[in-house]
Amino acid sequence: MPAPEAFDWLRYALSVALVLGLLALTLWGLRRSAAAGNALLGQGDKMVVLDRLRLSPRQQLLRVRALDEEILLAVSPQEIRRVGGRPVALGVEEEGTSDA
């Protein structure tokens, strides 16, 4: 009959394997659910950074298009603040952004 110490190591190894397996299964499930959520939203980018103006190394202004709105954001290490915004008609190309 094997020594009791062998059973302790076996129990330890199986416990670690079980925890790692559960972690891998959880991460796989989260990744799969995130991909399914993105597929439900539809194709294409839902948020695009149109312009960026660096005010200092740590502060910047961003002009962002999110769904059907153009938003001006002030970004610093402490906060992100909405400065302004305006609705944008979907499907309308912005001046100077066409590749042709």
Image (cartoon, rainbow, N blue to C red):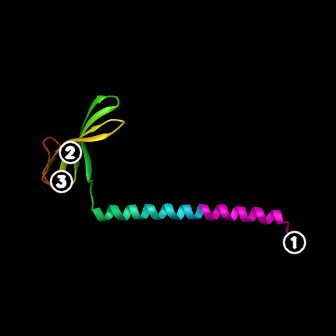
Q: CA distance from mark 2 to mark 3?
A: 10 Å
Task: Say which of 77 and 33 sits in front.
Answer: 77
Query: SS for tag 3?
Result: loop
How packed mark 2 is, by other alpha carbons closer than 10 Å (few <14, some 14-19, many 20 or more), is many
* Percent x, y of residue 43: 27, 60
> Which kind of residue does numbered mark 1 sit on?
Met
Q: Where is mark 2, residue-wise?
A: 71
Q: Marks 3 and 1, how far apart in space?
A: 72 Å
| Span of residues in magenta | 1-19
Q: Quadrant of the N terminus?
A: bottom right
User: Of helix, strand and loop, which one carries label 1?
Assistant: loop
Pointer 3 or 1: first along the chain: 1
Looking at the image, residue 13 sits to the left or right of residue 39; the answer is right
Q: Main secondary structure of the magenta part?
A: helix
Q: For residue 59: magenta?
A: no
* Label placed on residue 100: none
Figure quadrant of residue 39: bottom left
Instruction: Give the label, 1 or 2, closer to the camera.
Output: 2
Labelled disc at residue 68: 3
For badge 2, the amino acid type reads: Ile
Mark 3, other Cα within 10 Å: few <14 / some 14–19 / many ≥20: some
Across and down, in percent, residue 22 comes to: 56, 64
In the depicted structure, whether residue 81 falls above or below residue 87 = above
Question: Residue at label 1?
Answer: 1
Q: Residue at x 28, y 62 (%)?
A: 41
Amino acid at dot 3: Asp
Residue 88 in the image: state x and y as whole percent. 14, 50
- Element at label 2: strand
